[in-house]
Image (spheres, rainbow, N blue to C red):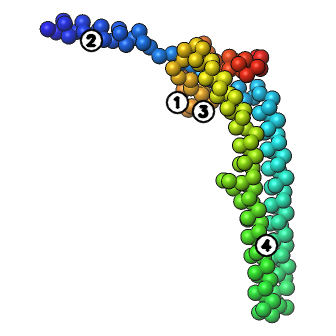
Amino acid sequence: MKKVLFVFIVMLFTTFAGYAQKYALIDMEYILKNIPAYDMANEQLSQLSKKWQTEVEAQLNETKTMYKKYQSDLAFLSEDQKVKREEEIVAKEKEAMELQRKYFGPEGELFKKREILITPIQDDIYNAVKAVSEERGYAMVLDRASSQNIIYATPRIDISNEVLAKLGISK
């Protein structure tokens, strides 16, 4: 009985071994570095970010200047003037924070611009990875750049250059 059970288990394992899955790796950082459109999009985003950051900093500096002037004039102001100036300073600070949120918030202009510029590139990469994996019969493709758990993988299963070729970029 033990022999029959052992033979059955061995046959079961050999059956599943025939259906072994094929895996591949890509290096998303490597792929993105080799796509000129991605570099151009990042440059555009960087320029916009610097421009908007300068704008926000100018408003914050204006608020600081208003506050310093208020502090130096404090002894000469009546209670009504103090309240009015404090309200102006707070309003200016809120305006600067709102501008910062408008540009850099979770649903801000920078986020929207990034979606417009980067999402099509990511979609193209996804479609190329999908096409290569379907052609070669891969069950799973992992990103080496984003996975901290991959300590070592043989370069034979890295299909990054094939993905670039599918995108029309020779390497």
Residue bearing mark 2? 9
- Of tags 1 and 2, the one toward the viewer is 2
Q: Give above or below for 88 relative to 53.
A: below
Local secondary structure at mark 1 = loop
Distance between mark 1 and mark 2 Cα atoms: 32 Å
Q: Is residue 154 visible?
A: no
Residue 36 at x, y = what percent?
81, 29
Furthest toward the bottom, the residue is 78
Residue under the image location 24 percent in, 9 percent down: 8
**First in sequence: mark 4 or mark 1?**
4
Local secondary structure at mark 4 = helix
Residue bearing mark 1? 149
Local secondary structure at mark 3 = loop
Q: Is residue 98 visible?
A: yes
Position of 134 with respect to 97 (left or right) is: left
Residue under the image location 72 percent in, 17 percent down: 165
Residue bearing mark 3? 146
Local secondary structure at mark 2 = helix
Residue bearing mark 4? 92
Distance between mark 3 and mark 2 Cα atoms: 38 Å
Distance between mark 4 and mark 2 Cα atoms: 76 Å
Residue 129 at x, y = what percent?
63, 23
**First in sequence: mark 1 or mark 2?**
2
Q: Are marks 3 and 2 in contact (CB under 8 Å)?
A: no
- Of tags 3 and 2, the one toward the viewer is 2
Residue 82 at x, y = what percent?
78, 87
Quarter where residue 101 is shown: bottom right
Task: Name the amino acid type tagged 3.
Answer: Ser
Distance between mark 4 and mark 3 Cα atoms: 42 Å
Distance between mark 4 and mark 1 Cα atoms: 48 Å
